[in-house]
Amino acid sequence: MSIKSLAEDDRPREKFLLKGKASVSDSELLAIIMGSGNRDESAVELARRILNSVENNWHRLSQLSIKDLMKFKGVGEAKAISIATALEIGNRKSQQEVLERHQISSSKDVFEVLQPHLSDLSTEEFWAVFLNHQNKILYKTCLFRGGIASSVADVRVIFKTALEHFSTRIIVAHNHPAGSLKPSSEDINITKKIDEAGKLLEIELLDHIIIAQNKFYSFKEEGIL
């Protein structure tokens, strides 16, 4: 279904999904927030009229009160509050500093990041930490539960996630609930598979960490990787 064939109130949402947020105009963004227009105007037309009244300036729009917004036909209290809320979120976002990403410089750093998630579990979990070229963490998540042998830590899922987060480096980790740090043959095999797949995609596997309570084993440090 093309965007043009949709009801006009639905088009901004579809455009946002299909073409990305940068493709959506200011009036279309406001229309998405409002959700609908009135009997005489679509949401986009109403949004355009509201923005025109403040010279298309978001700062001036944020200065309007709930009562001011409700003067526009089709804007009730709920819509007015939605508009004011969205503008206040934008205001608070602009006042916050961008959070500095945690940078990994050693296997111990990885251990400290993942120990709270893995050290006290009674079952095995397989995690991955996705990094940029500066070794700063972009994303970390549990990918599999139930052990390496049963899941074989699906390599496709690992690299699909890496690509989704534009990661150029990864570190994988899993826990040994029994407390032993010695890698199994399955641990070694999956490490080799991930390493080989990463070379094809130019996504480097930096390390594989085994965690057992307050200690860890690094494939990189032990010369296996």
Image (cartoon, rainbow, N blue to C red):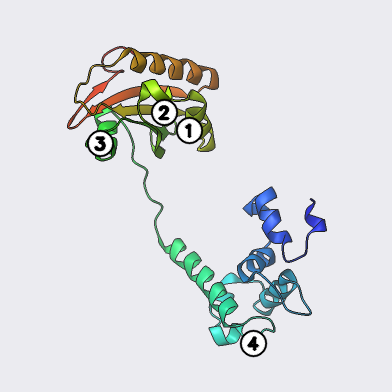
Q: Which amino acid, by three-letter code, is at mark 3?
A: Leu
Q: Secondary structure at mark 2?
A: strand
* N-term-proximal mark, 3 vs 2: 3
From the viewer's perspective, tell me whether residue 170 is left or right of residue 159.
Answer: left
Q: Residue at x 64, y 65 (%)?
A: 32
Badge 1 vs badge 4, beta-carbon distance below 8 Å: no
Q: Residues within 10 Å of mark 1 (few under 14, many from 20)?
A: many
* N-term-proximal mark, 2 vs 4: 4
Q: Which amino acid, by three-letter code, is at mark 2?
A: Ile
Whole-percent x and y of residue 16? 66, 54
Whole-percent x and y of residue 57? 62, 71
Badge 2 vs badge 4, beta-carbon distance below 8 Å: no
Task: Look at mark 4 in the image and give the residue it sits on.
Answer: 71
Tell me, for residue 167, which label it has, or none.
Answer: 1
Tell me, for residue 121, which label it has, or none.
Answer: 3
Q: Quadrant of residue 191?
A: top left
Q: Quadrant of residue 216?
A: top left
Task: Look at mark 2 in the image and give the residue it sits on.
Answer: 170
Q: Residues within 10 Å of mark 4 (few under 14, many from 20)?
A: few
For the residues carrying marks 3 and 2, which lies nearer the camera in this image?
3
Q: Quadrant of residue 122?
A: top left
Q: Secondary structure at mark 3?
A: loop
From the viewer's perspective, tell me whether residue 12 is left or right of residue 110.
Answer: right
Q: CA distance from mark 4 to mark 3?
A: 58 Å
Badge 2 vs badge 1, beta-carbon distance below 8 Å: yes
